[in-house]
Image (cartoon, rainbow, N blue to C red):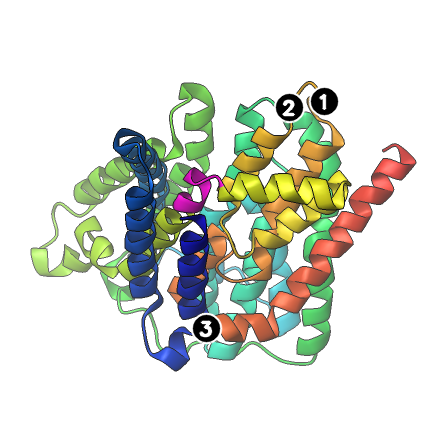
Amino acid sequence: MNFQLIAVFVIVYGAIVFEHPLKINKSASALIGAGVLWTIYAMGSLDVQLVNQNLSSSLTSTAQIVFFLMGAMTIVEVIDAHNGFEVLTSRIKNTALVSLLIFVSFATFFLSAILDNLTTAIVMVSLTRKLLAEREDRLLFAGMIIIAANAGGAWTPIGDVTTTMLWIGGQITPLAIMKAMFLPSLINMIVPLFVLVYRLRGRDVVAPTLANENLMETSPFERKLMFFAGLTILICVPIFKAVTHLPPFLGILLGLGLLWMLGDLVHQKKEEIHKESLTLVAALKRIDMSSIIFFVGILLAVATLEHAHILSALASKLDQILGRQSLIVMLIGIVSAIVDNVPLVAATMGMYSLTNFPVDSFLWEFLAYCAGTGGSILVIGSAAGVAAMGMEKIDFLWYLRKISGLALLGFFAGAAVYGLQLQLGL
């Protein structure tokens, strides 16, 4: 059974990679893969109840991520419908493309540490779409946003789902991970940024010529209100999680309801024809459901590898072959660009005990870095990458040619910095 699961997953992954030459939507490939993989897993298992329990567990974790993604994307669409991003764009006076890239990269890095890498990627990609007319420029910015968002999410316990897993599991503590991972994560972003700045030097920003169609329908007060209300909701989601210990998707759904109510109150005196495009109902129609469906398919497909113990077996085999935990963790980071980093981290947490590797030890800190930033190497390797891929229609092979090498360079540079910190006892 395991051989069949691996073979099907490789075929599905190949179909996703070569989406454009095959002319088959990646969402279709992911959904077919999920269905076939779970069928093979169910037919090859003797315990029907266990299969159903595993499916329910995987569906629950997938649904939480999807609900969060839908909520965050809808909030961003509501802000955009009110032309709320003008609050930021009107204050950005950079005419040089490299200056804007530096600003966007650092803003993404620090925002993702406060929010999370997925939400930050959605917000910043939406912002660059309002600032840049040239598609190639937007794609390069989106690639840098993915790298910066994943790097920023790796140095705080709430910035990335894998770091949160390690925090909740008791492997790391907030202050220790922030102290240990800030500089490596920053270097992970700066190295690729430096290369892109060199490539784009001397070029000016080409701004979109068309005005936002909703500009005349919203007042400055409405734009500011919806922008700051949406941003506050996104910022408060980690706080909601920390206080209530409930999953983040509940916080985003609560915030979405509040924003919906606020919008209805603000526009209650307007005629239906004038407020129709400003409602959350309209925003829900504009979110990219194709990318969300892809997310569902790929997560459910990977879950079969986890439940069939293929990932844990792979981790154990690596432990026997390589021996050195540093090499294993770096390999896990690179593999996380192909396979979702959540089950990889979960498998690693099951491989090593807190008895042998206590809280805040090298293994857990380095795992947080590698699993968090390794996903930038491929566009489908992280939630931020998948979201940006859907929003900007980024081609897998384009990302592989233009961004993957930069992400890999930053990955190794940050790892080297963390190793130097250990050597110096910092």
Point 12% across, 52% down: residue: 270
Residue 352 vs residue 417: left or right? left
Residue 252 vs residue 271: left or right? right
Element type at marker 3?
Answer: loop
CB-based contact (under 8 Å), mark 2 and mark 1: yes
CB-based contact (under 8 Å), mark 3 and mark 2: no
Q: Which residues are magenta?
A: 303-309
Q: CA distance from mark 3 to mark 2?
A: 40 Å
**Kind of residue at badge 1:** Asn
What residue is shown with label 1? 356
Q: Is residue 338 above or below residue 250?
A: below
**Kind of residue at badge 2:** Ser
Q: Indicate the quadrant where residue 18 lies.
A: bottom left
Q: Quadrant of the C terminus?
A: top right
Percent x, y of residue 46: 31, 35
CB-based contact (under 8 Å), mark 1 and mark 3: no
